[in-house]
Image: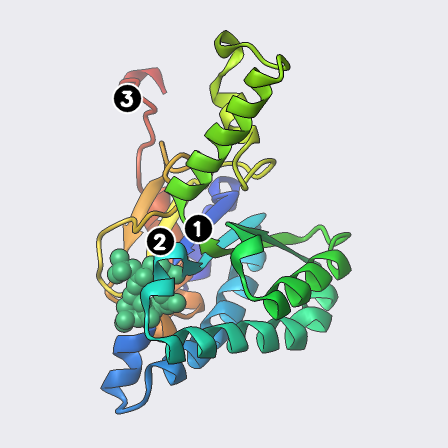
């Protein structure tokens, strides 16, 4: 069955966010080290990005490293950071060829300096591309992001630039690292875990969730299409009743 033909082109999500999970379990099943799973996971990123672009998705946010992931063994963290630096450096030309603008969310200043530099350079080099945004969540934690926004807003109040009564949804959103990026319509999590793990807590207020058993290194074009078809079967009511839609 042709999955692509089943997708309603008028109703594709503008923004898809993905919690790419299961690399370690995938590697273990192959009798390999966890890092091997992460490196094969990069293939899934490439394939998912192409598939998303294919169906007209404009923003793809990928949870690549959470603030809590710093608690993993040092060897795995070092390997992941290394993979990140090399992947970004290797992919910039391809991102430019396919019109991908790279962005990041999270606490960039807390990443190793080589990562910060490679990321900043790739972001700069791809900044004029308009086909799709690839947004990497790196050293990301939604609670950190919201706390950080509160600090910035508090500072503005203290300086007399803002009144407490002026605080609104929009003002809060402007102080998140996702400022300027619309909320995701669809959140996918692979590997069978059904939790949010501190991802985009503010932004997913009305997002549809799709959980799949597929481990991230096995996630392919067809899996993205299946998630979108599932999304398109939902009735998004935003607090209203069916008849009002
Ligand atoms: C997701 O895969 C990638 C990162 C969190 C960096 P995991 O490494 O969490 O894989 P599992 O969940 O242990 O299988
Ligand atoms: C969430 O996966 C973070 C990323 C995919 C980067 P984890 O594997 O770290 O989440 P938990 O620990 O299972 O909740
Ligand atoms: Mg995991």
Query: Seen from this angle, which residue lies furthest bottom?
Result: 31
Q: Position of residue 181 (x, y in %)?
A: 57, 39
The tag earlier along the polypeptide, 2 or 1, is 1
The tag earlier along the polypeptide, 1 or 3, is 1
Viewer-proximal residue among 170 and 42 = 170
Q: Which mark is residue 242?
A: 3
Q: Position of residue 76 (x, y in %)?
A: 38, 77
Under tag 2, what secondary structure? strand
Under tag 3, what secondary structure? helix
Depth-wise, is mark 3 or mark 2 nearer the camera?
Answer: 2
Considering the image in quadrants, where does the C terminus appear?
top left
Q: Position of residue 28 (x, y in %)?
A: 25, 84
Query: On the picture, is 90 further left or further right than 111?
Result: right
Q: Which mark is residue 188?
A: 2
Q: Which mark is residue 17?
A: 1
The residue located at (75%, 57%) in the rendering is 124
The residue located at (27%, 89%) in the rendering is 30
Q: Looking at the image, in which quadrant does ligand 1 appear? A: bottom left
Q: Residues within 10 Å of mark 2 (few under 14, many from 20)?
A: many
Considering the image in quadrants, where does the N terminus appear?
bottom left
Viewer-proximal residue among 75 and 212 = 75
The residue located at (41%, 77%) in the rendering is 38
Q: Are marks 2 and 1 in contact (CB under 8 Å)?
A: yes
Q: Are marks 3 and 2 in contact (CB under 8 Å)?
A: no
Under tag 1, what secondary structure? strand
The residue located at (69%, 69%) in the rendering is 92
């Amino acid at each position: 069955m042709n999955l692509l033909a089943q997708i309603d082109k008028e109703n594709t999500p503008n923004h898809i966010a993905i919690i790419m999970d299961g690399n370690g379990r995938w590697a273990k099943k192959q009798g390999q080290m966890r890092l091997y799973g992460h490196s094969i996971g990069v293939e899934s990123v490439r394939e998912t990005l192409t598939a998303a672009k294919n169906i007209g998705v404009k923003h793809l946010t990928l949870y690549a490293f959470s603030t809590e992931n710093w608690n993993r063994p040092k060897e795995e963290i070092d390997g992941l950071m290394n993979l990140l630096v090399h992947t970004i450096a290797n992919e910039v030309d391809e991102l430019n060829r396919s019109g991908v603008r790279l962005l990041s969310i999270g606490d960039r200043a807390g990443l190793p300096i080589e990562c910060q530099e490679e990321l900043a350079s790739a972001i700069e080099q791809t900044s004029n591309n308009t086909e799709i945004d690839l947004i990497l969540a790196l050293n990301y934690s939604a609670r950190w992001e919201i706390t950080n926004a509160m600090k910035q807003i508090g500072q503005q109040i203290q300086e007399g630039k803002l009144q407490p009564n002026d605080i609104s949804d929009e003002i809060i959103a402007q102080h998140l690292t996702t400022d300027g990026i619309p909320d995701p319509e669809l959140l996918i999590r692979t590997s069978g875990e059904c939790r949010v793990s501190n991802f985009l807590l503010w932004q997913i207020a009305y997002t549809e969730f799709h959980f799949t058993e597929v481990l991230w290194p096995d996630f392919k074009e067809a899996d993205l299409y299946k998630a979108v078809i599932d999304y398109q079967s939902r009735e998004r009511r935003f607090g209203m009743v069916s008849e009002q839609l």
